[in-house]
Amino acid sequence: MDQELPLKFHKICVLGLGYIGLPTASTIATRGVRVVGVDVNPMVVNSLQNGHVHLYEPGLQELVDEALASGNLVVSSQPEPADAFEIAVPTPFFDDKRADMTFVSSAAEAIVPHLRPGNLVLLESTSPPRTTVDLVVPILEKSGLKAGKDFFVAYSPERVLPGQILRELVENTRVVGGITPASAQAASDFYAIFVKGEIVQTDATTAEMVKLMENTYRDVNIAIANEFARLADRFGVDVWEAISLANRHPRVKILRPGPGVG
């Protein structure tokens, strides 16, 4: 698919207005781009249409106020035609620990009637490897268009810390994985609207794997710190002193024990 570089985005549709979607939609809107923020929860839509943010993140209310006042951010329960569609919906677990991809599938289905040649569809939801190519692409191709030929598809994992989302959304390095190199470039052009950090390109499945590796690395390191705390308590050892001393080793960096992954 031929692409004019950089790709131009005049209107963007963000599906899912949670801790990732709402800050992203609002940030882009304050950069002068028209954004339609979409959520299936009518209470969320109603609250935002009345100027009230439904979740807490430092600075987010002020950012949303600015985005709404600019006229560039519109909140709706339905997607609209746009140059790019970002999916930022939850991916919870079933009881058997399998990822529930229902929200991702539903979001992709909602995009289909509005998909046009030259569009970019970007998935940010934490997803099992091959979700983009095996789940999202087949749904989008119900439009009659061919992914990678008629429109771009990419995956990029969010990397923000609650409490620091607005800063990290802009400053952190972004990994963007396309189903084709042109799709990765299109996603890079999208993030260039507001990201100041480095934008690194790869393929979609690698980007999905990167997100799982990052989460697992944090999970394991938090878990082992808590296990050390349990052992220290068992043997009457001051875990804080022990960790401090262990961390004097040049290749050891044990985290502080705490409530666990959250």
Image (tube, rainbow, N blue to C red):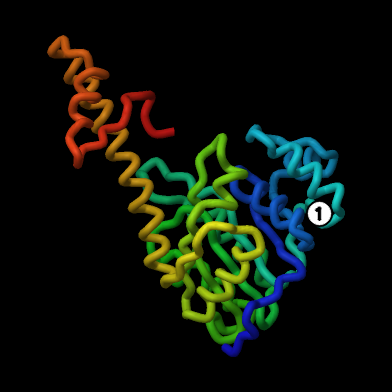
Residue 134 seen in render: no
In the image shown, does 83 or 240 lie closer to the viewer?
240
Q: Can you say whether 73 is above or below 53 in the image?
A: below
In the image shown, does 120 or 100 lie closer to the viewer?
120
The residue that disc 1 covers is 74
* Percent position of residue 47, x then y: 79, 38
Residue farthest top in this picture: 236
Residue 149: image quadrant is bottom right
- Identify the secondary structure beneath mark 1: strand
* Percent position of residue 243, x then y: 23, 25
Q: Residue at x 62, y 81 (%)?
A: 5
Residue 226 seen in render: yes
* Percent position of residue 77, x then y: 76, 53
Q: Residue at x 78, y 60 (%)?
A: 32
Q: Residue at x 26, y 29 (%)?
A: 225
Residue farthest left in this picture: 235
Q: Can you say whether 1 is above or below 191 in the image?
A: below
Q: Can you say whether 11 is above or below 144 in the image?
A: above
* Percent position of residue 153, x then y: 54, 73
Quadrant of the image containing the N terminus: bottom right
In the image shown, does 131 or 163 lie closer to the viewer?
163
Residue type at mark 1 is: Val
Image-based side of 244 in relation to 183, left or right = left
Image-based side of 241 in relation to 217, left or right = left
Q: Residue at x 47, y 76 (%)?
A: 179
Local crowd size for mark 1, using a 10 Å CA cut-off: few (<14), some (14–19), many (≥20): some
Residue 233: image quadrant is top left
Quadrant of the image containing the C terminus: top left
Residue 121: image quadrant is bottom right
Image-based side of 17 in relation to 213, left or right = right
How many marks the image carries: the answer is 1
